[in-house]
Amino acid sequence: MDELPLRCLLIARQGPQDREDLIQDHLLELAELARSCGFLVHARRVLKRSEIATKTFYGSGQLEALAGEAARHGVRHLICDDELRGSQVNAIEKVTGLICLDRTGLILSIFEQRAQTREAKAQVELARCEYELPRLKGAWTHLERQGGGVGLRGGPGETQIEVDRRMIRTRISQLKRELTHLEQVRETQRQGRPKGLPRVALVGYTNAGKTSLLKALTGEGEPRDLLFATLDTTTRKAWLGQDVDPETGEGDLAPTHCLVADTVGFIRKLPHQLVAAFRSTLGEVRTADALLVVADAAHPDLEDHLKVVGATLREIGCEPEGVEAQPRLLVLNQVDRLHRPQKLELKKHHPGAVQACAIQGLGVDEIRLWMRELIPGSAKPRELEDWELPESASTY
């Protein structure tokens, strides 16, 4: 007999300067994250509060009202869009009687469910350990703490915290050594790939259709309508056609190929622990000859998603310009869900992008042509779009 999904309440704080429509957008994304983790979302609530409460982050009266609603509807989990300290999570659980998760904790739980390979499991465990380490302060409060005064020794509570910290730090060191070894293995695999085959990395916001595009280009891949469906980098060979002039018949009849790598998706407020832990996996992005930036053209937050992708690429060392800048092609996927005026508006804002539908094969030939012409070779000078620039340089 299948177990019923766990019911949860989603909450987010709205300050005086915060736009409610943006908060609602973030809660919608949080609902998708919760669904990906196996939760059934009961309701989304925006808690308006001018100042952050030091102890509970949200107002105690607001939390008590949520606890009453949760009790009436059989809700056991409270998921917060805001990043909380460990002591705040403990205080919220004490006030509400609910199991509390913040956004980072929820994303880590999804990654823990999705991890399949040894490397992915080690990366997620490292991120979890680094997330939990500073949150031990609020633990073991049921035991005696260290008292003041000459000659007094620490109580068992303080001792247990120090033991836990030492164990987590030891585990972090072990995981970092293991990941260093696995990164060396991955580098050896890269060097063992056929020489002369250019490498292209698929990057973009999570659930934008990267795996669907991988399947359209290579014939392999298992697309799923879930956030963070792909954690492990998948590299496959793609056929790009032949370099033959269709009019004269002159050119190289040998087929042209490249390697295409599907990578982990990005998301707003992506936990820095995960970015650091997955740095070796994201090495496929840094060392690629070119990038295909895949975005969901039909998503209402398209421009915001592109800015998140641009910022994450800069964070992992992929600069949009300079000597080592990689050629980039923006692929606006799922345009089959748009009307003609919307497509024309997209063309106006992103003239260099390819409008595609990976499932239907729309735009795939144009992507293959771009890869065949630009790879290998140096990046051609081009005008950068706003999403690729730092916030200070953006024209938005």
Image (cartoon, rainbow, N blue to C red):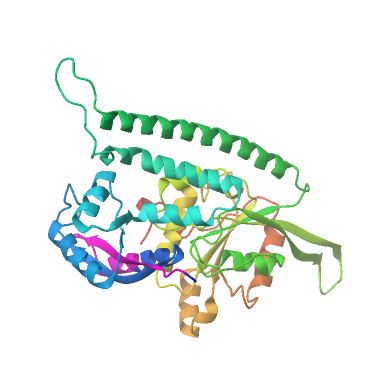
Q: Nearer the viewer, residue 65 or 389?
A: 65
Q: Position of residue 18 (x, y in %)?
A: 23, 62
- Residue drawn at (24%, 65%), measured in percent from left and top? 19
Q: Nearer the viewer, residue 70 or 175?
A: 70
Q: Is residue 236 left or right of residue 101?
A: right
- Residue drawn at (61%, 72%), measured in percent from left and top? 358
Q: Is residue 294 left or right of residue 247?
A: left
Q: Nearer the viewer, residue 274 or 351?
A: 274
Q: Position of residue 134 (x, y in %)?
A: 33, 38
Q: Nearer the viewer, residue 74 or 115?
A: 74
- Residue drawn at (26%, 41%), measured in percent from left and top? 138
The outermost residue toward the bottom is: 340
The outermost residue toward the top is: 151
What span is colored magenta in the figure?
Answer: 3-27
Q: Position of residue 62 (x, y in %)?
A: 16, 62
Q: Answer with the quarter of the image where residue 330 lies.
A: bottom right
How many numbered marks, from 0 up? Answer: 0
